[in-house]
Amino acid sequence: MKIAMLKIRHKKRAKQNHSRAGDVCSVLILILMGSFMALPLVLAISNSLKPPEELFIFPPRFLVKDPTLDNFHDVFVLMSQSWVPFSRYIFNTVFITLIGTFGHLFVASMCAYALAKHTFPGQKVIFWVIVTALMFSTQVTAIPNYLIMSKAGMLDSYLALILPAIAKPLGLFLMKQFMEQIPSSLLEAARIDGASEVTTFWRIAMPQVKPAWLTLIIFCFQDLWNLQGSNYIYTEQLKTLPYALSQISAAGISRAGATAAVSVIMMIVPIVIFVISQSNIIETMASSGIKE
């Protein structure tokens, strides 16, 4: 009876604290913030649909008045005139992005599992090296990466872009922090039941850190999708889609419309990946893990 009465009192307090006016205010604030954050995307789409006379009008107009698809048509015409097929650039980018993303996820997850759930000599030193590596930006490590790839004979190949992506420290740090939240008793129970270390890792540990690797996939995919890689790859047949599209933008104001269309084309895939994965991340973040 006491428990039932406490539940009733708790429900009454929840109803009293639950205000319809507060809900309306929250929704309005979210709509306002969402609209503000969507402005750059709306502007990019609007510019890609503007004819030349609207692109250079002053003062500039935010929304397009007479939309046209000529800018996108110009992009595909320009790319079709290239001596390397447009599909080759797409293949190069998709291949590098997929292999780099899942390679980074695979390596970072295994290393994070070892660092978080096993004890071995030099464990703390390795982790602090990883933390220190987070302080260095891509621009700082560009020259060392180039020298390493050159000495290893990997320049002008897919590996020159894939291997540095696999070795990024951010994913390892993120996965380790999530792996530490997994109860050691859960892993021990799996081992007692006869599960091998590989089975324990894939079937017990990885599902528990689903928010981490979904987030990692988004970050890594976006980085590799927008990677030009012209410093490491010289053969035209191996170059990426962002590099090919950047050559259109390099023509200046004469191709301002095509440049605006290029920016929208490059945004489409990362946005779709983010929208698809976002719901899973929110769901798993709300009910993630078991804690001791």
Image (cartoon, rainbow, N blue to C red):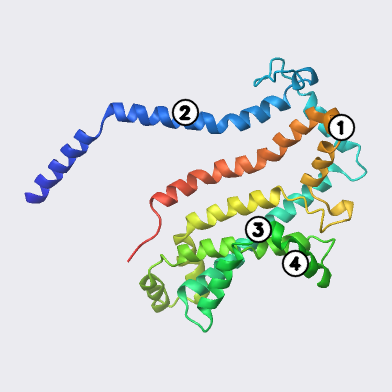
Q: Amino acid at mark 3?
A: Ser
Q: Nearer the viewer, residue 186 or 231?
A: 231
Residue drawn at point x = 47 percent, y = 80 percent:
119
> Label 1: which residue?
77
Q: Amino acid at mark 4?
A: Pro
Mark sitting earlier along the chain (2/1): 2
Disc 1 on helix, strand or loop? helix
Q: CA distance from mark 4 to mark 2?
A: 45 Å
Disc 3 on helix, strand or loop? loop
Q: Amino acid at mark 1?
A: Val
> Label 4: which residue?
144
Q: Residues within 10 Å of mark 1 (few under 14, many from 20)?
A: few
Q: Residues within 10 Å of mark 3 (few under 14, many from 20)?
A: few
In the drawing, what numbered circle is on residue 137? 3
Inspect this view and state whether residue 107 appears: yes
Q: Are marks 2 and 1 in contact (CB under 8 Å)?
A: no
Q: Nearer the viewer, mark 1 or mark 3?
A: 3
Mark sitting earlier along the chain (4/2): 2
Residue drawn at point x = 70 percent, y = 48 percent:
225
Disc 4 on helix, strand or loop? helix
Q: CA distance from mark 2 to mark 3?
A: 34 Å
> Label 2: which residue?
32
Above or below: residue 287 compared with residue 73: below
Q: Amino acid at mark 2?
A: Leu
Q: Residues within 10 Å of mark 4 (few under 14, many from 20)?
A: few
Residue 224 percent location from the top left of the image:
69, 52
Residue drawn at point x = 46 percent, y = 62 percent:
178
Mark sitting earlier along the chain (1/3): 1
Side of 137 where 84 appears, left or right: right
Quick one: which residue is furthest to the left in this view? 1
Residue 85 percent location from the top left of the image:
87, 44
Mark sitting earlier along the chain (4/1): 1
